[in-house]
Image (spheres, helix red, strand yellow):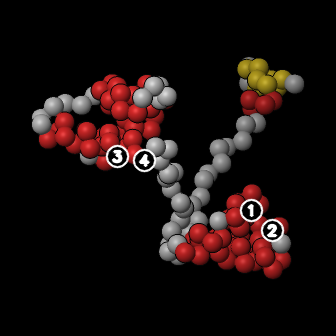
């Protein structure tokens, strides 16, 4: 359970930790090749040929229609659809008006305005993650 190494007592798990797994980005062309190979020979054959994880092949097979419509150099589908697009549009318009008038906008003001615009069903803490940093990047 423990190893003695030059005067230090270490557990075996601490001594033999695996390095972190590196993430890779694959373009749509390679994904489509892996999908077609998996359709002909099953997922495991595509895993061995392209040196990828089987869960990735399953995920790509679900995305096949979107991948065929994407550019061949596209690596991923980043970003999610907004939860409340109308609220986001109203807040964006309000932020632009405030900045045009020379007023400074804080994250607290954005959250407060979002709760007053869309009523009581959105709490201040729930609005913050999807709005605050979004408007600092957009404008």
**Which residue is labeled 2 in the image?**
43
**Secondary structure under badge 2?**
helix
Q: CA distance from mark 3 to mark 4?
A: 6 Å
| Residue 37 seen by the camera | yes
Residue 23 vs residue 54, the one in the foreground: 54
**Which residue is labeled 4 in the image?**
85
Q: CA distance from mark 2 to mark 4?
A: 38 Å
Placement of 39 over or under 17, stated as above or below:
below
Placement of 22 over or under 69, stated as above or below:
above
**Secondary structure under badge 1?**
helix
Q: CA distance from mark 3 to mark 1?
A: 36 Å
Q: CA distance from mark 2 to mark 1?
A: 8 Å
Q: Are marks 2 and 1 in contact (CB under 8 Å)?
A: yes
- Is 96 positioned to the left or the right of 87 in the image? left
- Is 16 positioned to the left or the right of 88 in the image? right
* Residue drawn at the location 51% of the way across and 68% of the way down: 74
Badge 2: residue crowd in 10 Å (few <14, some 14–19, many ≥20): many
| Residue 48 seen by the camera | no
- Is 81 positioned to the left or the right of 95 in the image? right
Residue 65, x across and y down, in percent: 63, 72
**Secondary structure under badge 3?**
helix
Residue 43 quadrant: bottom right
Residue 34, x across and y down, in percent: 70, 73
**Which residue is labeled 1 in the image?**
58
**Which residue is labeled 3 in the image?**
89
* Residue drawn at the location 78% of the way across and 73% of the way down: 38
* Residue drawn at the location 40% of the way across and 33% of the way down: 118
* Residue drawn at the location 54% of the way across and 61% of the way down: 76
Q: Earlier in the sequence, mark 2 or mark 3?
A: 2
Badge 3: residue crowd in 10 Å (few <14, some 14–19, many ≥20): few
């Amino acid at each position: 359970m423990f190893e003695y190494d030059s005067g230090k007592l270490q557990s075996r798990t601490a001594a033999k930790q695996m390095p972190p797994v590196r993430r890779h980005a694959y373009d749509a062309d390679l994904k489509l090749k892996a999908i077609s190979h998996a359709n002909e020979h099953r997922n495991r054959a595509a895993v061995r040929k392209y040196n990828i994880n089987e869960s990735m092949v399953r995920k790509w097979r679900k995305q096949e229609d979107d991948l065929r419509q994407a550019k061949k150099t596209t690596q991923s589908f980043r970003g999610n659809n907004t939860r409340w697009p109308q609220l986001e549009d109203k807040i964006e318009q309000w932020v632009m008006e405030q900045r045009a008038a020379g007023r400074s906008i804080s994250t607290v003001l954005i959250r407060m305005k979002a709760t007053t615009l869309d009523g009581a069903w959105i709490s201040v803490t729930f609005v913050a993650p999807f709005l605050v940093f979004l408007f600092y990047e957009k404008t």
